[in-house]
Image (cartoon, helix red, strand yellow):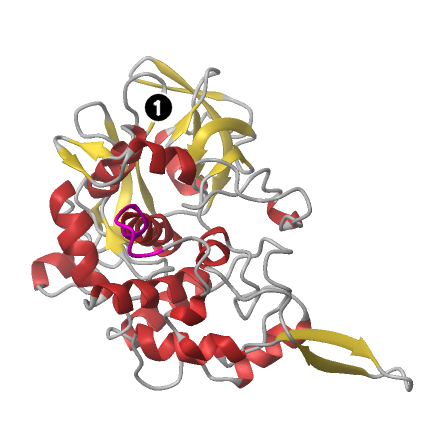
Amino acid sequence: MIRSDPPPVAFIGNDIRDKFFPNLDPVGKTLYLQGRPFQVIGAAKAQGSVFGQSRDNFVMIPVESYFKMFGVRDVRTRLSMTPDTIFAIHSMTKPITSVAAMMLIDEGKLALADPVSKYIPSFAGTKVGLEVTKPDGSLALELVPPIHPVTIRDLMRHTSGISYDYIGGKWVELAYKAANIFEGPFDNREFAERIAKLPLARQPGTLWRYGHSTDVLGSVIEIISGQTLYEFLKQRILDPLGMNSTKFVLKTPEERARMARPLPSDPVLLAGERDRLDHPEWESGGGGLLSTITDYQRFSQMLLNGGELEGARLLAPKTVALMTSDQLPPTTERHTPTRWQSVHLVPFQRWVPALNLVSPFAWMPA
């Protein structure tokens, strides 16, 4: 969701542009949908998309306002995009998991200052990796103690030092790949144990960096609640908000037929889809949910309403205000390639890099 006083923006696929707007030069031009101007700020290869707009200049996806569907959800079946098309939402899972954690904080069952080791004792022994140059000029990895334990706040604002295997220095990539953290079957508890054995890429609190922090947070939620992550999300967030199509695994042929599939020529999304299907037992709090545009609109609207939707209150207004305020101290290094201006507990941005605008809060998944 993106609030802007200038014309809202649109990001359309080249394929969609060529078929539906053949005379549109995408970047820097204005596209009119139902009489509303949308500034086009980028284009990408896409087989289809669903676009929505709501009232009061909030670019969102509510059914009652406006829908525009482009293209197909699967190039093999040629089935069209629909409002109930199910997408692998990847990092759009992170805000939902983070809201779940904030609900536990509201209830006094969890605190931002808690060390992660309070819930996952293995993190008490986690070290920080430091690449050093030896006298002969070769590089070596030293393990040093963290300046402070990784906290729940560090997990929620991505300052834990926990990385992804494709982000950071070469030693980070090698260490993560050598650990085989995706080997065999595993659940959130086991995955958190595997992460705890890896060195942190940076000292906690010193760098914002994308990584498996929210996956570890999912394990903390399970430990506190005594439920699986999906059981907690379903009981406390998904059912109250009517998000009936949001889940980790599709169970029925009807659900699977609604799934949007990657282009056969897209190796990145195809690899992600293989990983998801290879590990149906893993309820990844950082990237595992499947959802629809209508479901996610309801979640987004709950946040815009200050934690409530249609009589279902999930969070106190003061908690939403805390979540969407800048949490990084001036001394913390931002993840420069994404040019984040501020980082929030539920990962929202005030300055949206891909859109070049300032918003009350927005989440640009990576």
Residue position for label 1: 58
Work out whether 332 lies above or below 193. Answer: above
| Residue 51 placement (x, y as % from top left) | 31, 33
At a point 59% along the width and 46% down the height, the residue shown is 338
Packing grade of label 1 (10 A; few <14, some 14-19, many >=20) is some
The kind of residue on which mark 1 rests is Phe
Residue lying at the far front of the rendered structure: 108
* Image quadrant in which you'd find residue 204: bottom right
Tell me: 272 left or right of 168.
left
Depth check, front residue: 189 or 69: 189
Residue lying at the far right of the rendered structure: 135
At a point 32% along the width and 50% down the height, the residue shown is 105
Work out whether 176 lies above or below 24. Answer: below
**Quadrant into which the N terminus falls:** top left
Q: Is residue 35 magenta?
A: no
Tell me: 247 left or right of 211.
left
Depth check, front residue: 99 or 277: 99
Give the residues drawn in magenta, as a range: 104-110
Work out whether 52 lies above or below 209. Answer: above
| Residue 178 placement (x, y as % from top left) | 55, 85
* Image quadrant in which you'd find residue 228: bottom left
